[in-house]
Image (spheres, rainbow, N blue to C red):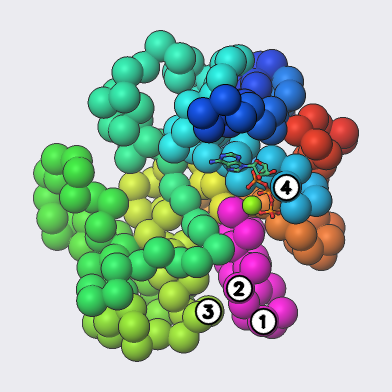
Amino acid sequence: MNPVVLRVSDLRKTYVDGDVETPVLKGINLEFHRGEFVSLMGPSGSGKSTLLSILGTLLRPTSGEVELVGNKLSTLDDGDVTRFRNLHIGFVFQFHHLLPDFTALENVLFPTLPRRVDDPRTERARAIELLRRVGLSDRMNFRATKLSGGQKQRVAVARALMNAPEIVFADEPTGNLDRDTGEEVLALMRELCVEHGTMFLISTHDEEIARRSDRTVRILDGRVVSS
Ligand SMILES: Nc1ncnc2c1ncn2[C@@H]1O[C@H](COP(=O)(O)OP(=O)(O)OP(=O)(O)O)[C@@H](O)[C@H]1O
Ligand SMILES: [Mg+2]
């Protein structure tokens, strides 16, 4: 079995708003290995997006530990977490979150901005190769606003892989696409998972995605019911 890239121990999250407390994650334990392609399912409101946000270091848990590629998140301060996220984690969201006035190529290069780039030409070549890989060689210099929904999502997949992250979190990445386009984007993520050894964790309401993943983590009311 490949090494563990993500370990979650007794993870809890309670949202607090004034004197209203909303417990959402109630003790999650999980382990993921390098190169795994995993789906995350559960009814609306079960805590999928909350879990992905915490694992993706966008949100701090109330208690429990997340260990990502050997780093315990609780030991990192906010600046370290930001650097860590940029180097090791990619995201694909339901809505692509591309920068509308920038081209496909510029959007894919965007994750390289916060870090020191040794050779811009190498980075550019990698971005071009990723766009070729997602089938958009002829759209590289199109602004995001001039791409179709499926094309935008493929740019988002290329962008997620730009910094060669160990892990990609995808929150309903096909939720906004028609079935054929959704399948295309899923197949692409699966291929990239195999080629790059990247672990993918994909939240979805689509049983078809679950069937096509290595395994499915199911959560219900903030607890893992099967994994
Ligand atoms: N900032 C917040 N403050 C308070 N409660 C929140 C907050 N964000 C989410 N919640 C609550 O946490 C619960 C889980 O939300 P979450 O978005 O994680 O669910 P989900 O499984 O992703 O649902 P969906 O399938 O609809 O996307 C919901 O009941 C929601 O109302
Ligand atoms: Mg959600």
Question: Which amino acid type is shown beneath numbered disc 4?
Answer: Gly
Residue 2 visible: no
Question: Which amino acid type is shown beneath numbered disc 3?
Answer: Gly
Contact check, label 1 and label 3, Cβ < 8 Å: yes
| Residue linked to disc 3 | 150
Contact check, label 3 and label 2, Cβ < 8 Å: no
- What number is the disc on residue 45? 4
| Residue linked to disc 2 | 176
**Does the magenta run of residues contain 183?**
yes
Name the residue: 40% across, 11% down. Answer: 75
- State the image coordinates of residue 111 (x, y, percent, origin top left): 28, 51
Whether residue 122 is situated above or below residue 76 in the rendered picture: below
Secondary structure beneath dot 2 equals loop
- State the image coordinates of residue 105 (x, y, percent, origin top left): 27, 71
Label located before the other in sequence (1 or 3): 3
**Does the magenta run of residues contain 166?**
no
Label located before the other in sequence (1 or 4): 4
Name the residue: 45% across, 66% down. Answer: 96
Mark 4 beta carbon near ligand 1 (under 8 Å): yes
The stretch of residues the image draws in magenta is 171-192
Spatial distance from mark 1 to mark 2, Cα to Cα? 7 Å
| Residue linked to disc 1 | 178
Spatial distance from mark 3 to mark 2, Cα to Cα? 9 Å
Quarter residue 46 falls in = top right
Contact check, label 1 and label 4, Cβ < 8 Å: no
Viewer-nearest of discs 4 and 3: 4
Spatial distance from mark 2 to mark 4, Cα to Cα? 18 Å
Contact check, label 2 and label 4, Cβ < 8 Å: no
Question: Which amino acid type is shown beneath numbered disc 2?
Answer: Asn
Residue 177 visible: yes
Label located before the other in sequence (3 or 2): 3
